[in-house]
Amino acid sequence: MQRRMQARARRNLFPGRMLSNPQKIDAVAARKKSNEHVPGNCLCGAVELEIDFPAFWAWHDHSSASRRAHGAAYATYIGVWRKHFRVTKGRKRITRFEDKTGAARSFCARCGTPLIYEWKRSPHMINIPRALFTTRTGREPRYHLNIEERQDWAYTGERLVPLKGYPGVVWERPKTKKRRRDIENSSL
Ligand SMILES: [Zn+2]
C-alpha cells in the first residue's frame, strides 16, 4: 500500500513523463519559430537562463514543499527537456538544496529566487518557475498537482472591491451573518 502511494507521489511530481499526448501549442505560439529562445532571470538579475520555445508543459503545484520553497500559496512551473535549457549568466551564483525524497531545488544565492526544480527519476526534465519569464513560454498551466494540499487562504478569484481609505487596496468582503449561518448549517 505504502509502495503504491510512493509510486503515485513520484508520478505526481513529474507527470510530464505520462503525457502521451502533450498539450497542443496554442495558435499564437505555433506561429513562433521553434528555434526561438525564451529568456528568464532571478529578482536581482545575477542569474539569467533560457529555454527553447515552446516549453514541454506547465502546471500549478500545490504541495507543501513547493509552497514553503517559494514562500507562496502555490508554485507554477514549466517543464522542459534538459537539452532545451541553459544558464546563460551567473552559474556560480546558483545554490542547490536536495531533500530526502531526491528532489533538488536550486536558487539564486544572492536574492533567493527559486530557479530550478529537478527530480532524480526524471533526469532529462528541468522544471522552472513560470514567474521567471516575462514573455510567452508556449504552454498554459492547465494542470494542478497535489490539489488536495491547497490552502484555504489561497486566493481563488473571489470577488474583490476597493477598500475605502486605502487607495490601491482591494479586499474580499466578509460574509454576512446570515450567509455565514447558512454555510455553517449546510456543513452539519
Ligand atoms: Zn538573484
Image: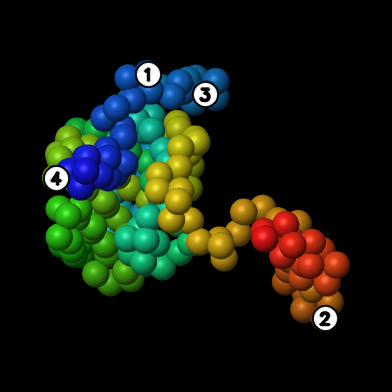
- Label 4 or label 2, whichever lies nearer to me, is 4
**Mark 4 lies on residue:** 120
Tag 3: residue type? Asp
149 lies left or right of 119:
right
Residue 84: x percent and y percent?
25, 33
Query: Comparing marks 3 and 1, which lies closer to the viewer?
Result: 1
Residue 136, image x and y in percent?
A: 48, 37
Query: Can see residue 16?
Result: yes
Q: Name the residue under label 1.
A: 21
Which mark's residue is nearer the viewer, 1 or 2?
Answer: 1
Q: Which residue is drawn at 67% across and 60% down?
A: 188
Residue at the spot 33% in from the left edge and 47% down from the top edge: 128
- Which amino acid lies under the numbered mark 4 shown in the image of this protein? Lys
Q: Which of marks 3 and 2 is nearer the N terminus?
A: 3
| Residue at the disc numbered 3 | 26
Residue farthest toward the front in the current orientation of the protein: 188
Label 1: which secondary element = loop
Instruction: Give the labeled residue for mark 2.
Output: 165
Query: x%, y% of residue 8?
Result: 27, 40
Is 64 placed left or right of 184 in the picture? left
Name the one closer to the observer, 31 or 172: 172
Q: Which of 158 and 175 is in front in this view?
A: 175
Secondary structure under badge 3? loop
The residues tagged by marks 1 and 2 sit, at their Cα atoms, a distance apart of 51 Å
Q: For the residue marked with disc 1, what is the amino acid? A: Asn
Kindly tell me whether mark 4's CB lies below 8 Å from ligand 1. Answer: no
Label located before the other in sequence (1 or 2): 1
Q: Which of marks 4 and 3 is nearer the N terminus?
A: 3
